Amino acid sequence: MTEFQNILYEIERGRARITLNRPDKLNALSLELQAELNEALWEADNDTSVHCVILKGAGRAFSAGYDLTGAGRNVPVSRIQEQGKAYRGGRSIDDDAWQLERAQRLRMALFDMHKPSIAQVHGYCLAGGTDLALLCDMVIAADDATLGFPPARDLGALPNNFWLYNVGPQWAKRLTLTGDTVTGKEAQQIGLVMKAVPAALLEQEVEQLADRLALIDPDLLAANKRIINLGLELMGARTLQRLAAENDVRGHNTAAARGYMKSVAEHGLKTTLRARDAKFGDGRARVDGPEIRDAEGRLVEE
């Protein structure tokens, strides 16, 4: 079997385990990684021995988001792409939308494939990490995982948006308008994840659910997944994803996004992100009780 460069893929006992495997980069989602993930997902969907997919991350995080360094960007659109020929970049608004839609099609395999998927979330699940997790059919997180979309503070809008369908409009706005984060335990309370468990029990929890799915005829699993997803489509979920990509182009053309790009060019990515997030203290929201903060914007424990 041809080895992937950015993910691990294994089949065992009726499940395909797909592991995002850039642990030194907190599994930042390059276009190359997303292309490999798309390929692996459709392989699992085509494999008659597979009943479900488990998606997880290697190292300290599920995924800290999209790779903003530009690494792993050189992925040909087709096998006949010619070197030196002029192709789309990001020069125009339409180029930006086209590139965002291209990457989104790779991720949407999680929603479109017939077989169910489980996101096994630990550590950081930020920005693009939430895009992947929320496209899965079920999300199980560690209690102490950190979930949120900090780039909404200055870089753009969400290029996939299933938040509305999981947490409702108010919590979707509370978290995406500020970029604040919640823990896995809090994410369960608001419906952002299906379930949160102690980190030490996370793998066991996910694997035992996969054990139960392995007892069901894959064609029947597909029928029951697809009718629910078709219901989501009737509520506009599939169309909203296309609109989310176009809306992100709007976000990229704000004064805040232009300031972000200028800062990255002048000061570098790490300094820019550190300066942005420092203004938000610990960057946390609180689901239960008042948000009392100290002078540095950090939540004060009750």
Image (spheres, grey):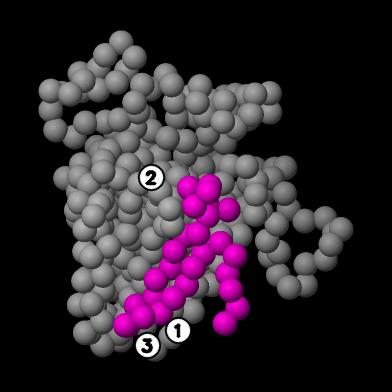
**Residue range (magenta):** 1-30
User: Which residue is rendered at x = 26% and y = 31% of the image?
Assistant: 285
User: Which residue is labeled 1 in the image?
Assistant: 46
User: Which residue is rendered at x = 21% and y = 31% of the image?
Assistant: 286
Quadrant position of the C terminus in the picture:
top left
Q: Amino acid at mark 2?
A: Tyr
Question: Answer yes or no: do the residues labelled 3 and 2 have beta carbons within 8 Å?
Answer: no
- Quarter-wise, where is residue 111 in the image? bottom left
User: Which residue is rendered at x = 27% and y = 62% of the image?
Assistant: 203
In the displayed structure, would residue 115 be above or below residue 247? below
Q: From the top left corner, tell me how far across and down residue 261 is, in percent.
A: 63, 30
Determine the secondary structure under disc 3. Answer: loop
User: Which residue is labeled 3 in the image?
Assistant: 49
Spatial distance from mark 3 to mark 2, Cα to Cα? 31 Å
User: Which residue is rendered at x = 25% and y = 52% of the image?
Assistant: 199
- Quarter-wise, where is residue 120 in the image? bottom left
User: Which residue is labeled 2 in the image?
Assistant: 124
